[in-house]
């Protein structure tokens, strides 16, 4: 499946900033996102993807893009988000259940990204661009870290987690193994029960004493 095909029919595009005065059109936004994807699939480096070139490929004016995104950094972040599954809705039944769903979403993202040479290339280029990486971290990475911390904090407040734990450290302990498997060890298996096994292994040593 191509990067553009993975986004077909998906209207999950977020506004790049406040103050957009005209009604938004999902069809226009899709055409812009898919225009960027086509250029990436053709091998155009991120550094050469100007707003003018994207507008020409998508068949829209530059003003149309700037009404929806503050610049190409915000646009590229939404392109990457569009190529990934949406973040899951956590069940809220228990800390363990929420953590399993959270990690399962990361496992699925890993499975999706592995066969995509384009995504690997784009992510590598993005890391070499401080502005794009900063935008991606602020819009994608940081909200996910906050969501994970909220789950752990609720678990600590509900007595599912020892009261003396460092929430940030526990978040790293929970998410770290999945990050290693999906990013640092692309050859490592990602079995269906991986999220449950990680969560149970970590929580075994962090439960309050009986």
Image (cartoon, helix red, strand yellow):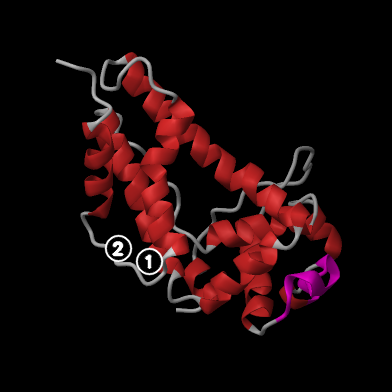
Position above or below: 10 against 174: below
Image-based side of 132 in relation to 11, left or right = right
Position above or below: 52 against 131: below
Q: Which residue is mark 1?
A: 111
Which quarter of the figure is the N terminus placed in? bottom left
Picture coordinates of residue 11, whole percent (x, y): 54, 57
Picture coordinates of residue 155, whole percent (x, y): 32, 23
Helix, strand or loop under label 1: helix
Are there few (<14), some (14-19), or many (20+) residues within 10 Å of tag 1? some
Instruction: Name the mark on residue 82.
Output: none
Which quarter of the figure is the C terminus placed in? top left
Q: Which residue is mark 2?
A: 190
Q: Disc 1 vs disc 2: Cβ atoms closer than 8 Å?
A: yes
Magenta span covers which residues? 44-56
Are there few (<14), some (14-19), or many (20+) residues within 10 Å of tag 2? some
Mainly helix, strand or loop, the magenta region? helix
Picture coordinates of residue 46, whole percent (x, y): 74, 70
Q: Is residue 30 magenta?
A: no
């Amino acid at each position: 499946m191509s990067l553009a095909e993975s986004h077909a029919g998906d209207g999950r595009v977020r506004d790049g900033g406040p103050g957009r005065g005209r009604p938004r059109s999902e069809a226009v936004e899709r055409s812009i996102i898919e225009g960027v994807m086509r250029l990436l699939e053709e091998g155009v480096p991120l550094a050469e993807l100007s707003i003018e070139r994207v507008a020409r490929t998508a068949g829209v004016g530059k003003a149309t893009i700037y009404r929806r995104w503050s610049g190409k950094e915000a646009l590229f972040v939404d392109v990457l988000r569009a190529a990934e599954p949406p973040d899951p809705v956590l069940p809220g039944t228990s800390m363990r259940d929420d953590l399993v769903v959270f990690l399962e979403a990361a496992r699925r993202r890993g499975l999706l990204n592995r066969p995509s040479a384009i995504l690997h290339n784009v992510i590598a280029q993005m890391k070499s661009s401080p502005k794009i990486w900063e935008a991606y971290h602020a819009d994608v990475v940081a909200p996910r870290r906050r969501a994970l911390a909220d789950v752990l904090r609720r678990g600590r407040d509900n007595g599912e987690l020892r009261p003396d734990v460092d929430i940030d450290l526990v978040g790293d302990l929970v998410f770290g193994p999945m990050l290693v498997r999906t990013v640092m060890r692309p050859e490592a298996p990602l079995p269906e029960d991986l999220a449950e096994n990680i969560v149970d292994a970590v929580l075994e040593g962090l439960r309050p004493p009986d």
